[in-house]
Image (cartoon, grey):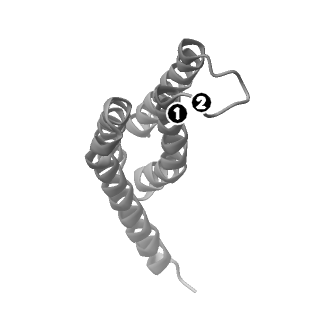
Amino acid sequence: MNQYIYASFITLMTVLLMMGLLFNVGRARGKYKVQAPATSGNEMFERAYRIQLNTIENVLLFLPALWLYAIFIGDKGAGDSGVIWLIARVWYAISYQLNPAKRGLGFLISLLVIAGLWTGAAYGIFTQFTKVSI
């Protein structure tokens, strides 16, 4: 049963992205000698740490929207949106690490994808409610 193959794939890729960011923070801790539980001390470590936290915050909005869209509108559209979101988040992470002032476009694109998924999901749920007889 592969009804939601695209949303499933994007979910796996999202977890892979988060694991990559986790390892990046660990690498930065060692490289810049920021001992746990400290979360500050070197700007490059702090960038890696903020990228990870900002992405976790973004994922909390993204994954429910992705799955609700897949269920109520369509899996393929959710998957296509997910690819755009993933590219935007990778772009965001690279931009932030190199120059935090340049992170805005990756953030904006990922936020617009989430808004589109939530809007589509809300529409899909609303149409289901209108089909329910009282």
Furthest toward the front, the residue is 41
Left or right position of 37 against 85 = right
Q: Measured along the vertical axis of the image, is residue 122 above or below residue 116?
A: below
Q: Quadrant of residue 83?
A: top left
Tell me which amino acid carries mark 2. Answer: Gly
Helix, strand, or loop for circle 1? helix
Point 47% across, 36% down: residue: 51
Residue 1, visible in the rendered structure: no
Q: CA distance from mark 2 to mark 1?
A: 7 Å
Residue 91 image position (x, y, % from top left): 30, 34
Q: Measured along the vertical axis of the image, is residue 35 above or below residue 60?
A: above
Q: Local crowd at mark 2 within 10 Å, few (<14), some, or many (≥20)?
A: few
Q: Viewer-proximal residue, 118 or 8?
A: 118
Left or right position of 30 against 128 = right
Disc 2: which residue: 41
Disc 1: which residue: 46
Of marks 2 and 1, which one's residue comes earlier in the chain?
2
Helix, strand, or loop for circle 2? loop
Point 31% across, 44% down: residue: 101
Residue 37, visible in the rendered structure: yes
- Indicate which label's residue lies in the foreground, 2 or 1: 2
